[in-house]
Image (tube, rainbow, N blue to C red):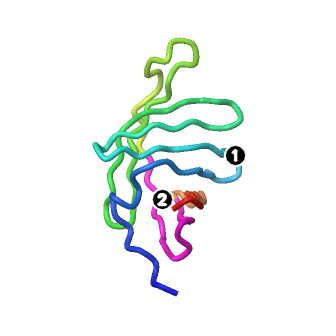
Amino acid sequence: MPPPPRLTAELLVGSWAYRWGDRCDGRITFHADGTYHSYHEPNGQRYVGTWALEGTTVVLKEYALHRETGEPWIGPTRYEFALATRDYPTLPGRTSGGTVVVLSDPRR
């Protein structure tokens, strides 16, 4: 079995299913230009912002979009979470506050 890939920005670009702690599931799409968009299921809250990879830590600067107008409503809020590639294409990690974050994409 080959070793897991190194965590790089190129590896993250694309769409991922995610689980954020025990409260949110959703999809997040990382774009090569450093922007991203996401939505939480089942409530459909949408978010946009920027992302960067600092070592093994993903740094998000996020704006919540107003449900009626689609305009940025709350933010920016900064989130950081470290990821591991040992179970690629599932990327388990934790926020700096200890919340479990998991990205997955079985099509990779």
Query: Residue 86: where, in percent of width, then height?
Result: 52, 77
- Snapshot quadrant of residue 50: top left
Q: Does the magenta stretch include residue 80?
A: yes
Please tell me whether mark 2 sits on a helix, a strand or a loop: loop
Image spot of residue 79 (x, y percent): 45, 48
Tell me the magenta residue range: 79-94
Decide: is 45 above or below 12.
above
Tell us which disc is closer to us: 1 or 2. Answer: 1
- What secondary structure is the magenta-colored segment mainly? strand
Residue at 54%, 30% (x, y): give it.
Answer: 46
Q: What residue is pinned by disc 1?
A: 23
Locate residue 65, reporting x and y percent.
Answer: 50, 24
Indicate the quadrant where residue 42 lies.
top right
Q: What residue type is labelled 2?
A: Ser
Residue carrying label 2: 96
Query: x, y percentage for residue 12?
Result: 41, 56
Q: Which of 97 and 23 is in front in this view?
A: 23
